[in-house]
Image (spheres, rainbow, N blue to C red):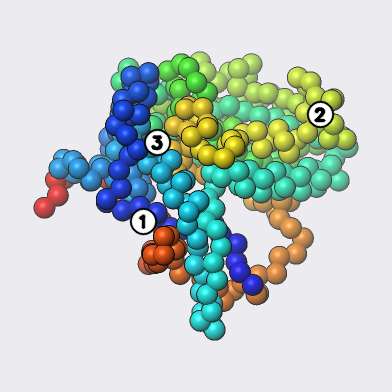
Amino acid sequence: MSPSGTEQVTLQGPSRHSYTNSTNHEIVKEKPSRDRRLTDRPNVTLREDVRDWVTLKGDLPVTWAEAEQRFLEYDQEARQTENVFENTETGETATSAVSHRFQSEYREMWYAKFNDLLRTAQDRWSVVHTTMLGLTASSTPNGDRQGPVDHWNDCDESNDAVKQAIRRVKDKLGDAVAIEFVEAHPGGGTNDGYLHKHPVILSGQRVPDADLQKILNAHVNNAPNAEHDAHDLSRSVTRSRVSPRKDVEEASEEVIGNLPAYLAGYLLNYGESLDELPESQLAGATVMWSTGAQSVRPGQRAQEWMKPEEEDDDELSAWILAGVERDGEFIPASDDPSSGGVDRFTTSWDPPD
């Protein structure tokens, strides 16, 4: 039996370059923020794919625009690459197509999980309430524009405090689940392409305003680039109920006709290639790809509700990812298990030897 493929290995090395410089110039001309390096800070860990191999100023990443082009190349190469698995007991090998979390299959996988989530919620509650919060941050907190990775790292500094505030809400309600989505700001505006996050709480009753304000405060008080003015209840909270029949025709401002489709709407949706995405979505996905940030972050109980009833992993336990094969060349997987098979580097402003 052949294991299924997941994103595991870095598909590029120092010799890799962007599509064309003209493409980068066009992006930068329209959106000057894309000319910033991904980060201006030292000690930031990024995937090796976005290392600037030309500069002598230190171990630095490329610009946002260049990273977008490398991301598109990565996607194209992934579609021409196969995972190679090895059975540690028999020595047998097997292959499968390389897939990664930015492909359409990922969205389809989560759509199926969201159906499991809805079924469990409807079994428990006569009415399913959804409460979505928008947690954002300024890309120019002190007047100077941040690099996209620095912006996201600062925005997500509130992660622990927000999770703790949501946990208190769930404990107060007695029965609720939470799942958080990370996505890019849509086109236009100062934050175009920069990341923000949306916690969604599913419960059998309405969440009180006072408790929601505590979640918003937890974000603003712990994310250095978040602003109080942008996080009042009227602007940052959306309440809905879920149609009991998963009927799109019942959808309205107060009723979600199809919850799985509603939740999957936070994930990338495109046809055959990532370059079909609006540039702002591509820019945000590039930041997630570069940093390893996840677009879906379910709480523990939500994970349990979305897990299949029985998962038999015994047959797969002997299989390991040995590497990938592209154009007849075998590329071994990374030796560092903590990297998830992706080669990474840490930024530094110290010039190389």
Of discs 3 and 2, which sits in the foreground?
3
Q: Which residue is mark 3?
A: 68
x 72%, y 47%: residue: 112
Q: Secondary structure at mark 1?
A: loop
Separation (CA) of disc 1 from disc 3: 18 Å
Total labels: the figure holds: 3
Residue 307 position, x and y percent, is 71, 55
Q: Is residue 60 left or right of residue 178?
A: left
Residue 44 position, x and y percent, is 32, 44
Query: Which three-letter amino acid code belongs to the residue tagged 1?
Result: Asp
**Quadrant of the image containing the N terminus:** bottom right
The mark nearer the N terminus, 3 or 2, is 3
Q: Which residue is mark 2?
A: 248
x 48%, y 34%: residue: 275
Regarding residue 136, the answer to whether it shows in the image is no
Q: Which residue is mark 1?
A: 343
Residue 319 or 218: which is nearer the viewer?
319
